[in-house]
Structures are given as structure tokens and as C-alpha cells.
Image (tube, rainbow, N blue to C red):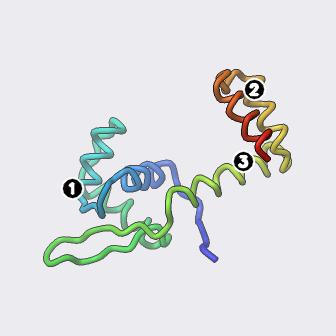
Amino acid sequence: MMIIEKLTESEELVMKAIWDCKKEPVLSDVVDRVNGFYGKDWRPQTVSTFLAKLVRKNYLKMQRDGKIYTYKVLIPESAYRQKLYKHHISFWNHNDIGEFVTEMFDNGDLTQDEIKDLQDKINDL
């Protein structure tokens, strides 16, 4: 069983940048993505610190490729997202998925198309 540790907001941002890469990134890829897509102005040393923490938390494996280090994802984004929403529903909605969906509906977070898609999925069960 894979243990998924909680990430800080900054660690989460770095992981998201890596999950969105189409290849195993090097440090400069991660720095470019974090700064370009997420509006940060982080130096390579800052990103490297977060990468080291992510390696310690077993989200990533650092691999040497000649003189270059690449980062291999060990925990897929889907597994992390599943942990997040399960925690949210259990903590905030008392394990009641219906309460969670109702809350989204009441807040206007669901479009009519999304509601129709949910209805179709329920009807297909």
C-alpha cells in the first residue's frame, strides 16, 4: 500500500508542475514551469529544496543520467487527488458524498452540463 504524505502548498505546486510534464523533468524544467505557469519567481535552489523534500516524502525518485539528474514520479497525480477529495469529504462532509455534491450544487459550482453528466452516470448504474 502506497503511503501518501500531506504536502505543503509549495510542494504541491512543484508536484503539479512535474505531473504536468510530458517527460521526466530536470531541475530547469521544473523551475521554468513553476515560474512560468504559476507566476512564481523562484530560484533553482528554492525549487531544488522542494524537490529534495518530495524525494524524502517518496513522491519522486531522483535519477542520475550522466551529469544530469531527472525526477521520476512515484505517486501519480490521480492517487494524490483521490486522497485529497476523500479527506475533504470525510473531514468536512462527515463521509457523506451526497452532502458534498449538494454543497457544490448549492454554491453554483456545477454547470447544467455537469449536472446532466452526473444524472446520466447515475442512470447508467
Crowd class of label 2 (few under 14; some 14 to 19; many from 20; radius 10 Å)? some
| CB atoms of marks 2 and 1 within 8 Å | no
Q: Identify the secondary structure beneath mark 2.
A: helix
Q: Identify the secondary structure beneath mark 3.
A: helix
Left-right relation of 65 to 100: left
Q: Amino acid at mark 1?
A: Ser
How far apart, in angstroms, are the residues tagged by discs 3 and 1?
33 Å
Q: Amino acid at mark 3?
A: His
Left-right relation of 55 to 40: right
Comparing 115 with 43, the one in front is 115
Residue occupying the point 33% across, 53% down: 21
Question: What is the x, y in percent for residue 68?
Answer: 17, 71
Looking at marks 2 and 1 on the same chain, the residue that comes earlier in the sequence is marked by 1
Looking at marks 3 and 1 on the same chain, the residue that comes earlier in the sequence is marked by 1
Question: What is the x, y in percent for residue 10?
Answer: 45, 50
Furthest-front residue in this view: 124
Q: Is residue 2 above or below residue 27?
A: below
How far apart, in angstroms, are the residues tagged by discs 2 and 3?
16 Å
Q: Identify the secondary structure beneath mark 1.
A: helix
Question: What is the x, y in percent for residue 8?
Answer: 52, 53
How far apart, in angstroms, are the residues tagged by discs 2 and 1?
41 Å
Mark 2 lies on residue: 105
Of the two numbered discs 2 and 1 in the rendering, the one whose residue sits closer to the viewer: 2
Mark 3 lies on residue: 88
Mark 1 lies on residue: 28
Crowd class of label 1 (few under 14; some 14 to 19; many from 20; radius 10 Å)? few
* Residue 78 found in image quarter: bottom right
Comparing 102 with 53, the one in front is 102
Q: Amino acid at mark 2?
A: Phe
Question: What is the x, y in percent for residue 1?
Answer: 64, 77
Furthest-left residue in this view: 67
Looking at marks 2 and 3 on the same chain, the residue that comes earlier in the sequence is marked by 3
